[in-house]
Image (cartoon, grey):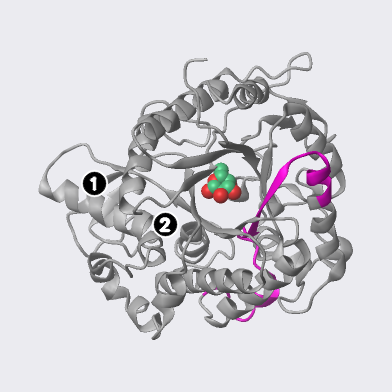
Amino acid sequence: MTLGFPDGFRWGTATAAYQIEGSTTADGRGPSIWDTFTARTGLATGDPACDHYRRYREDIGLLSELGIPYYRFSVAWSRIMPDGRTVEPRGLAFYDRLVDALLENGITPMVTLYHWDLPEALQAEGGWPNRELADLFADYALTVHKVLGDRVQQWTTINEPFCAAFIGYGNGDHAPGIQDEGAALVAGHNLLLAHGKAAQALRSDGGEQEVSIVLNFAPVLTDVDDAAHREAARRFDFLHNRFFLDPLLGRGYPPELLADLAHLGTLEPAIADGDLEIIAQPLDVLGVNYYAPARAVPLEDPETDSNCPLPGLRGMDVQPPRGELTSLGWEQRPECFTDLLLWLQGHCGGLPLVIAENGAAFEDEVVEGRVHDEKRVRYFADHLAAVHAAIERGADVRGYMAWSLLDNFEWAMGYTQRFGLVHVDFETQERVLKDSALFYADVVARNGL
Ligand code: FCB
């Protein structure tokens, strides 16, 4: 072994409810915004996805076979509260069974309460731009905690509020598919408020627990090191990497960011007295998702919209990725991962970090019952080495969750992007371990690369 990880390092895989479960009408589940968005736009839907709702025991069996001790999954709000408010016991019972089955197999469950699948009934009430959702989310969090809290210690409130707010309500590429930047900023604020209220609710319910939120980070690269490029990079960095992080850390929104967004006129009015205190609940750990960096260039005309998920972020534009790309067109830059973790270590004042997602989509093929996914093996090896380098240089990284256990429903891209360690034939639902699964299992077994 050349690169050993710290003792007790948490190795896991991650999934999300809508991406794997299928069975979208089973046991009283109500529609989520992803059901209605995909139906309206004609995109592929999350049914049957990996049919995990019915095959969860088989999938847990795979984890057990691979010896991967942690499993991060999300709970579908629309199963627990089909109308956003009324509890459906059959939905809760599914996650109850799932947690028991994980524990029976010696796997530690890590729950994410919101991975983008808002009950449609709450979108009908305005969705995340409606501040009332923060309280409803806290009620939902408490409801789930009351059932799972005796067995689950690791709780993540929200996954990637950046995407939920800006891709959902900004450029509209994701559900609910709304293009209203002013509303997107309010959605972002309300998601933070929902996190804070849910963190309070979880802690009010007793028990030992670790509360986190998962943010996605994109280190920003520029070609030219001059004032204009630095300013373009700064704008994107503040929107992507600090809009959510700084308020969580108790610093409020950076003043430069408020100035960048002032022309949209909605963020500052949305911040009520006391909100920033609620948002800044102490975090036990920060979940970090890293896939790829972004590239920024200045826009000459300061009034022109950018092509970033929040087009109203002006003065900068996002450039196409380059170099070695994944099948999703994401740039492979493991060195940016190390830099990101070291930056977070300093910026967050030593808050422990867990990599909640990292992984890559490539075109895979099953040949004679095997999937030789060398590119994914290389991606994981390089990115794990990058995490190791950050730890060596002082970053307090406690764990790593590979995205993803299974090939799954990749949101607006449907089933075209395979991120799994396990290949899924979406016609037959047959699972085949890829070489990357065996590689990862070996890393986990040796606690090193
Ligand atoms: C992240 C999402 C996750 C998955 C990966 C590829 O942004 O959290 O659900 O789609 O990207």
Q: Is residue 108 magenta?
A: yes
Q: In the image shown, does 428 or 96 lie closer to the viewer? A: 96
As measured in the structure, the alpha-carbon distance from the residue carrying label 1 to the one carrying label 2 is 15 Å
Q: Amino acid at mark 1?
A: Val
Q: Residues within 10 Å of mark 2 (few under 14, many from 20)?
A: many
Q: In the image shown, does 198 or 335 lie closer to the viewer? A: 198
Identity of the residue drawn at 24% across and 53% down: 234
Q: Amino acid at mark 2?
A: Pro
Q: What label sits on residue 297 in the rendered view?
A: 1
For the magenta stretch, what is the residue range?
A: 100-128
Residue that carries the numbered disc 2 in the rendered image: 309
Helix, strand or loop under label 2:
loop
In the current view of this chain or complex, which residue is farthest to the bottom?
A: 273
Q: Judge: label 2 CB < 8 Å from ligand 1.
A: no
Identity of the residue drawn at 75% across and 72% down: 81
Q: In the image shown, does 444 or 173 lie closer to the viewer? A: 444
Identity of the residue drawn at 73% across and 67% down: 144
- Quadrant position of residue 357: top right
Q: Answer left or right for 31 relative to 225.
A: right
